[in-house]
Amino acid sequence: MAQKKKILITWGLGYIGSHTATVFIEAWYDVIIVDNLSNSHESALEWIKAITWRTPKFYELDLRNYSDLDAVFEKHASDIALVLHFAAKKAVWESCHDPFLYYDHNILWTINLLKVMNKHKVNQIIFSSSATVYDAENLLPPFSETDRTKTTNPYWTTKLIIENLLRDMVMHKWFSTIALRYFNPIGAHPSHILWENPKWVPTNLLPFLLKVAKGEIEKLSVFWNDYDTPDWTCIRDYIHVMDVAEAHFAAAQYLFNRVEINETSETYTAEPIFEICNIGTWYWKSVAEMIWIVETIVDKEIQYEIQWRRSWDVAVSLANPLKAKQLLNREAKRTVVQWVEDAWLYLNNEKRK
Ligand code: NAD
Ligand code: WQD
């Protein structure tokens, strides 16, 4: 029996989903994307096609709609080897303002998806978790997967709940899961035609820094400079989005290699597993260092102003990436120059307009 080669990506036109799609398509997997375009544009499909020379199958649908999702599985399930589950609302401030929205969307979407997967016997999933589940204020960095967890807002809590939900599914022998705890994904595709292109204004550090560099915003707001770090600003573990995308590919290969073929060439899956892997670099950069790096790479002075402290910020978030290296044989390859340069070249790319 031929191996299944289709990969279904929930939220495949968003920032991380679209970059990950290019990696799988370039490795000759058939990719099916579901997305409701609420925070992305259909143009991402064109850019994926321009990069890979192939167009993934796309369904514009809302994951909240069970029957629509069921119809997609009805059509493709016999060939789907794996689901990459990126779907989540992800703004911390919004989740504090409207917790029900986050529990409702993030958790119910996942339950919908798992029910449909179970119905159609698709039993491998890679889940987008987050480094924000660590009890960062009380742990000594870098953080390892076995370290204590604690969350301070509904968005981060939904990640922890879904991890536990998926762990339970393994106990009941339904799914094999790898939860990837991303640290801070940044940067753009090296073609410089694909980056994050949300409908909501992004609130992360690099997009803001580059807007200041382009003169679209006058100053960067630096969220506080009284942290217990060498230059008093927060330290993060930034990782290039293509390193995050390739980590999904490595995790997929790990899952696929567990599928054995018996003498009669029937495939069957090995015992279900649940694994968590940090996706970070162990290299840290403070906000002050990031300002200096951007100034050096784009050769412009960045104006900034020290503002208030964001209630959810922690002083240091840093990955111990050894488990991903050992289990998935995968470590980050890109440098800080690529993080910034790829995004800067994207913003200045005339071909994209
Ligand atoms: P994104 O906002 O760029 O992409 C989200 C996509 O989902 C968009 O294309 C949007 O149109 C689509 N969408 C929204 N609601 C939908 C619905 N009901 N049905 C179908 N599609 C819907 O997000 P991202 O940054 O690519 O994040 C992907 C995943 O990674 C999320 O689970 C997020 O929590 C996680 N994560 C992200 C980061 C980060 O810094 N970007 C860090 C850690 C974890
Ligand atoms: C990095 C540093 C800010 C913007 C966020 C989410 C988290 C996760 C990843 C998905 C911090 C400082 C930022 C600005 C600033 N998403 N900063 N001025 O907060 O580490 O993580 O994205 O799971 O949920 O919270 O990333 O890029 O927002 O901030 O001074 O305009 O830059 O205070 O120290 P963060 P970030």
Image (cartoon, grey):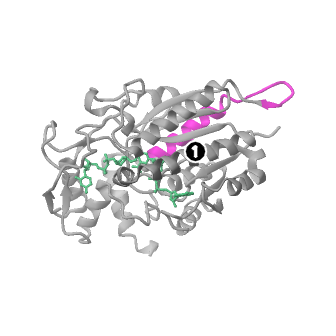
Q: Is residue 154 left or right of residue 56?
A: left
* The C terminus lies in quadrant: bottom left
Badge 1 marks a residue whose secondary structure is: helix
Q: Is residue 117 left or right of residue 131?
A: right
Q: Is residue 157 left or right of residue 8?
A: left
Q: Is residue 96 left or right of residue 59?
A: left
Amino acid tagged 1: Thr
Queried whether the magenta region covers residue 151, the answer comes back as no
Residue 149 image offset from top left, x and y in percent: 38, 30
- Quick one: 306 or 168, which is closer to the camera? 168
The residue drawn where x is 57% and y is 49% is 109
The residue drawn where x is 75% and y is 47% is 77
The residue drawn where x is 56% and y is 65% is 50
Residue topped by disc 1 = 110
Q: Quadrant of residue 253?
A: top right
The residue drawn where x is 78% and y is 45% is 78
Residue 37 image offset from top left, x and y in percent: 54, 64
User: Could you classify mark 1 by the number of other residues whose Cα lies within 10 Å: few (under 14), some (14-19), or many (20 or more)?
Assistant: many
- Quick one: 134 or 126, which is closer to the camera? 134
* Total count of labels: 1
Residue 113 image offset from top left, x and y in percent: 63, 46
Queried whether the magenta region covers residue 256, the answer comes back as yes
Residue 57 to residue 217: above or below: above
Q: Quadrant of residue 214?
A: bottom left
Residue 93 image offset from top left, x and y in percent: 33, 53
Residue 132 to residue 327: above or below: below
- Quick one: 34 or 281, which is closer to the camera? 34
Q: Is residue 54 visible?
A: no
Residue 259 to residue 101: above or below: above
Q: Which residues are magenta?
A: 243-267
Q: Is residue 24 visible?
A: yes
